[in-house]
Amino acid sequence: MPATNIAPARQRGAGATADALSVLNSVFGLPGFRGAQEEIVRHVTDGGNCLVLMPTGGGKSLCYQLPSLLREGCGIVVSPLIALMRDQVAGLLESGVKAAVLNSTLSFEEATAVEQRLLAGDLDLLYVAPERLLTPRCLSLLGRAKIALFAIDEAHCVSQWGHDFRPEYIGLSVIAERFPNVPRIALTATADDLTRQEITDRLALAGAPRFVASFDRPNIRYEIVDKQNAQTQLKAFIQQRHSGDAGVVYCLSRAKVEETAIALAKAGIVALPYHAGLDAGRRARHQDRFLNEDGIVIVATIAFGMGIDKPDVRFVAHLDLPKSIEAYYQETGRAGRDGKPSTAWMAYGLSDIVQQRRMIDESTGAEAFKRVSIGKLDALVGLAETANCRRSRLLGYFGESPQAATCGNCDNCLSPPLVRDGKVIAQKLLSCAYRTGQRFGAMHLIDVLIGRLTERVKQFGHERLSVFGIGSELNEKQWRAAMRQLVAMGHLRADSEAFGALKLTDTARGVLKGETEILLREQTSGRDRPSRTKSRRGDLAPAPGNSGQATDANLLGVLRAWRSEVARTRGVPAYVVLHDATIEGIAASRPRTPEALRDIPGIGDKKLERYGRELIELVNGTAS
């Protein structure tokens, strides 16, 4: 079987013409480009700069990996996380690409060896941490090497308006200053207009084209439930909907991460904690188990996940409200990278709004930053409270007009909530908050509205108020839902300095006077328990290489076992050896010759050479 040969791509200076599609097929085993990939690849290969916004799983990596193979020199990829570098380099090496990293995990001797390979022209791609790139030693090294391009991955990190700003990214402006003739490609999955502009300014991309792909992830089902007992709700969600699946659960604090991981483990779910408070060795072991084993659930703070390439994460759950729609989109986007049906599930309550507002108010950021942060939080609360299609709301935030008013794959579309005239309810609630002095939180207001004669109610004499007991027609859960929605509409605000006291805003006057229309969403009886994740959309394509054929379950099991053993021997995640879609394609088509195996997406020349004989023997030796 022929070895991978990408020599033509390395000989552009000698006059040879490399064809992007042939390299895509021979190296990565992919039959064609998706979306704007081809236009981006050709633009950068021809020496152009650009900004690429493409959702997680949309194929951003190929947009700089291919030009690095098609241009003279080595592509330099600036990446913020060691895990991202490790996974991508492992995958590239499996495909026969000469790739390496320069980061803090290397010894001096190992780093020196990588530097020598770069200077000798023996690397196609080099992944560098931003803080390493900015050192005088590294800049000097790059100045002496032949550089094909610079790719700034997770480019939103350069913006103070982005959801994951990293100070070390600020210095990356030096790339344009020191290497003005080397093409630069900035890539991110999430960036609003403010963030896009700052990326453009800081990385000197003025005038460069922006390639903005659709932000839609049709295979992900978005679900947001009213938070009651979050851990109990989470356990039920996993056991009923995603038993045995790999997933990520996000919590705001380290303590909550630990508590949740223990609770899941007691329920028989294989769950591991991950946060910055764990020692580095334990974090690494937990991450490796998540990447290499099936059915592991990671419970983590947001420190986990950026750049993780694991394609078969079937769900992402949030037990706390993220900071913004950008953060929510980035984190939920780690589900279903392989294009298969997956779930983004979140439990959300009024306390989440109070907590996030307090964090913003207590931050050391400038007032302008706080205003933008509050606006981003309000947009996310609006997404959580909407009675309409969540996907449409999400796409609209990023400036994208959905093709249809309903997506058929979010909780609001699958189980539409009831909406009723809430003017009287809102007036009662606002009046109660006003007459009690705007000094009390949700629980006390509910006690007054329902007419509970608690010690605290008696302490302040609130049983003598005209609003005492005027809301007995609703229960506690319904009043909490009404409060959240009035906060989301902007008629109430949670005062973080007064321990979550609910205060009237300027717009509350119009509600009290009956001049403002109020529609409140009601929860339907089956709202928290949709059927097992299965998209109702008719436009989801079958897994690549499957072509709708029935998968041979027996052969699939054999292939999975073989892949696990190969991954263990080679010390790489299973999906680096072969993606699920590839082994499912093999199990469906049962190729019996190298030529037929080569036609399976994901089988490039190098993987055919390395694994082809074994795979064909497994197919021929397994009864259908």
Image (spheres, rainbow, N blue to C red):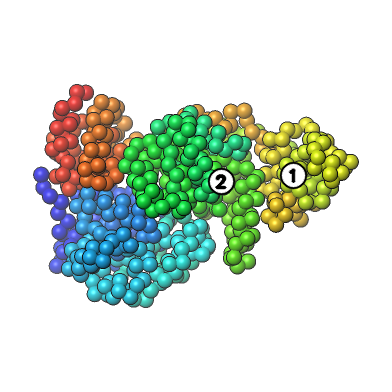
Mark 1 = which residue?
Answer: 517
Q: Residue at x 38, y 48 (%)?
A: 282
**Which amino acid, by three-letter code, is at mark 2?**
Asp
Q: Nearer the viewer, mark 2 or mark 1?
A: 2
Q: Which residue is rendered at x = 48% and y = 64% of the image? A: 159
Q: Are marks 2 and 1 in contact (CB under 8 Å)?
A: no
Q: Earlier in the sequence, mark 2 or mark 1?
A: 2
- Near mark 1 (Cα within 10 A), the count class, few <14, some 14-19 or many ≥20, is few
User: For residue 226, which quarter of the picture?
Assistant: top right
Quadrant in the picture for the N terminus: top left
| Residue 106 seen in render | yes
The residue nearer to you, when weighing 180 against 554, is 554
Q: Can see residue 196?
A: no
At a point 28% along the width and 75% down the height, the residue shown is 140
Direction top: furthest residue: 623
Label 2 to label 1: alpha-carbon separation: 30 Å
Quarter of image, res 363: bottom right
Q: Residues within 10 Å of mark 2 (few under 14, many from 20)?
A: many
Residue in the picture at 17% in, 48% down: 606
Residue 387 at x, y = what percent? 62, 39
Q: Nearer the viewer, residue 294 or 429?
A: 294
* Coordinates of residue 238 in the picture (x, y in percent): 47, 33
**Label 1's element?**
loop
In the rendered image, the vertical position of residue 103 relative to residue 338, given as above or below: below
Residue 582: x percent and y percent? 27, 39
Badge 2 is on which residue?
Answer: 320
Under mark 1, the amino acid is Glu
Disc 2, SS: loop
In the figure, 37 relative to 620: above or below?
Answer: below
Question: In the shown orientation, is residue 343 left or right of residue 418?
Answer: left
